Amino acid sequence: MKKSIIAVLLASVLPVTAFAQGYHVDGNVYASDTSLSGAMSVRYNTSVSGSPYIYANGYANSAVSFYGRDSDGDNFVCSVPTTSALYDQAVDIKNSLTNGGYLYVSKPSSSSTCSSVYLLNASYWTE
């Protein structure tokens, strides 16, 4: 009896995994002197040249920084100081970056301080 129940459950689940590919977007990074945007899955996109990357760092009670380079070699960096109104949100976003995340960060051209930070988590960037 238990074996037949397991067989029925497997039969109902396995076909779903066979066609559950879904919509997919390869990871890319776009960097300029005022903005950075990109998918955290960029390292999986073998069609992109130039070794693009995107990351964020920070530790307890310190500024949060966002970095990136696109496939053209354009770089971006900005930081959110602990005194900024964006600080708590920047910490939350940094801590939430995972495969499937799409990050957008901007700053004024004459500054190294981030003016906006945005994160979208979506299954179509997941590898």
Image (cartoon, helix red, strand yellow):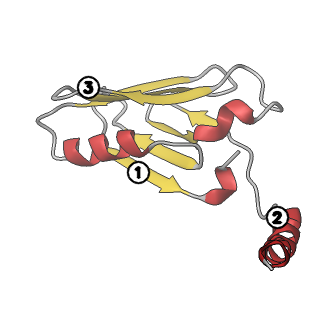
Q: Disc 3 versus disc 2: distance between alpha carbons?
A: 39 Å
Mark 2: which secondary structure?
A: helix
Label 2 sits on what residue type?
Answer: Thr
Task: Give percent across and percent down for residue 26.
Answer: 74, 45
Task: Give percent across and percent down for residue 111.
Answer: 29, 28
Label 3 sits on what residue type?
Answer: Tyr
- Residue 22 - label: none
**Rendered image quadrant of residue 43:** top right
Q: Nearer the viewer, residue 108 or 53?
A: 53
Labels 3 and 2: the sequence-earlier one:
2
Provide the residue designation for mark 3.
Answer: 59
Labels 1 and 2: the sequence-earlier one:
2
Q: Residues within 10 Å of mark 1 (few under 14, many from 20)?
A: few
User: Which residue is located at x 81 percent, y 80 percent?
Assistant: 1
User: Which residue is located at x 46 percent, y 38 percent?
Assistant: 35
Provide the residue designation for mark 1.
Answer: 118
Labels 1 and 3: the sequence-earlier one:
3
User: Which residue is located at x 54 percent, y 48 percent?
Assistant: 102
Query: Does residue 115 appear anywhere in the picture?
Result: no
Provide the residue designation for mark 2.
Answer: 17
Relative to 56, residue 6 above or below: below
Q: Disc 1 versus disc 3: distance between alpha carbons?
A: 19 Å
Label 1 sits on what residue type?
Answer: Tyr
Mark 3: which secondary structure?
A: loop
Relative to 73, residue 85 above or below: below
Q: Residues within 10 Å of mark 2 (few under 14, many from 20)?
A: few
